[in-house]
Amino acid sequence: DEIHRADVERRANEETFRAVFEQCADGVMITDDDGRVLDINPSGCAIFGRRRDEVVGTPFWRHIGDVPRSRAYSEALLRTGRLTVEVR
């Protein structure tokens, strides 16, 4: 039926996303509307030198460089709903 097929498709999409997220060479953080980290991939952990459990639940700006500049990033994220930052 339609509901079962949609559920199977949703699960397949989630598995694909998880595989890409976990194996991506770029660091990726997923945040909520308040800027708290919901998830971070292994590359992100390596970039920031932290374990996943040290990052998840914290404000993302704590991990991306100097705090005054990071707060501006946070405000942009909250204002627009998107943020792309290159960490060097």
Image (spheres, rainbow, N blue to C red):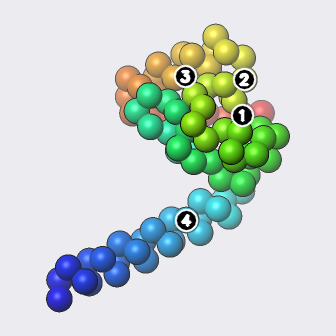
**Residue furthest to the bottom:** 1
User: In the rendered structure, which disc, 4 or 1, sits on the residue that comes first in sequence?
Assistant: 4
Residue that mark 3 sits on: 73
Residue that mark 4 sits on: 18
User: In the rendered structure, which disc, 2 or 4, sits on the residue that comes first in sequence?
Assistant: 4
Q: Residue at x 76, y 45 (%)?
A: 51
Foreground residue among 1 and 47: 1
Dot 3: element: helix
- For the residues labelled 3 and 1, the Cα–Cα distance comes to 12 Å
User: In the rendered structure, which disc, 3 or 1, sits on the residue that comes first in sequence?
Assistant: 3
User: In the rendered structure, which disc, 2 or 3, sits on the residue that comes first in sequence?
Assistant: 2
Indicate which disc residue 1 carries.
none
Dot 1: element: loop
- For the residues labelled 2 and 4, the Cα–Cα distance comes to 27 Å
Check disc 1: other Cα within 10 Å, few if <14, some if 14-19, many if 20+: few
- For the residues labelled 2 and 3, the Cα–Cα distance comes to 11 Å
Q: Position of residue 49 (x, y in %)?
A: 82, 40
Check disc 2: other Cα within 10 Å, few if <14, some if 14-19, many if 20+: few
Indicate which disc residue 87 carries.
1
Q: Which residue is drawn at 54% across and 16% down?
A: 72
Q: Which of marks 1 and 2 is in front?
A: 2
Residue that mark 2 sits on: 65
Quick check: 33 above or below 51? above
Q: Residue at x 49, y 30 (%)?
A: 35
